[in-house]
Amino acid sequence: MKKRTGWLIGAFALTAGAIGAMSTQRKRKRMQATRKANDVWARPGMLVTFRAELMPGRERDERTFRVKELLSSGRVLLQGVDGEHAEKEFEPVQFDRPLE
């Protein structure tokens, strides 16, 4: 293989990689924009329960609070509890659980 052919193949590979990276980046941006608008883990008025590790010795009813406000950062303000709280602090949401 001549020197010029090797250079041409290398340039082609580099260009193909750059095009692939740009298209992947565009797809991610589009996906994140739609996910942020539609994918919210909590809504105002919804009941959430703190994980038992964060409030040891308390029953489930004592660890359950109502969401007062959803912040733009994805954190929530709760009724009866001070401060902002993240999704990781709560048990996974159970949609089949009856409302109180």
Image (spheres, helix red, strand yellow):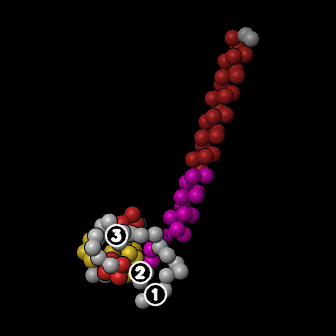
The kind of secondary structure element at disc 3 is loop
Mark closer to the observer (3, 1): 3
From this view, report whether residue 38 is shown above or below residue 21: below
Specify which label sits upstream in the sequence, 2 or 3: 2
Residue 41 shows up from this direction: yes
Count residues near mark 2 (Cα–Cα under 10 Å), then give few for <14, some for 14-19, many for 20+.
Answer: some
Q: Residue at x 63, y 34 (%)?
A: 17
Marker disc for residue 99: 1
The kind of secondary structure element at disc 1 is loop
Q: CA distance from mark 1 to mark 2?
A: 8 Å
The kind of secondary structure element at disc 2 is strand
Specify which label sits upstream in the sequence, 1 or 2: 2
Numbered range of the magenta stretch: 27-44
Specify which label sits upstream in the sequence, 3 or 1: 3
Please state, as top left, top right, bottom left or bottom right, where the C terminus lies in the image.
Answer: bottom left
Residue 27 percent coordinates (x, y): 61, 52
- 52 relative to 32 in the view: left or right: left
Q: Amino acid at mark 1?
A: Leu
The reply to whether callout 3 and callout 1 are in contact (CB within 8 Å) is: no
Q: Amino acid at mark 3?
A: Ala
The majority secondary structure of the magenta stretch comes to helix
Is 17 a magenta residue?
no
Q: Amino acid at mark 2?
A: Leu
Residue bearing the label numbered 2: 47
Is 30 a magenta residue?
yes
Marker disc for residue 52: 3
Residue with the most extreme right position: 1
The reply to whether callout 1 and callout 2 are in contact (CB within 8 Å) is: yes
Please state, as top left, top right, bottom left or bottom right, where the N terminus lies in the image.
Answer: top right
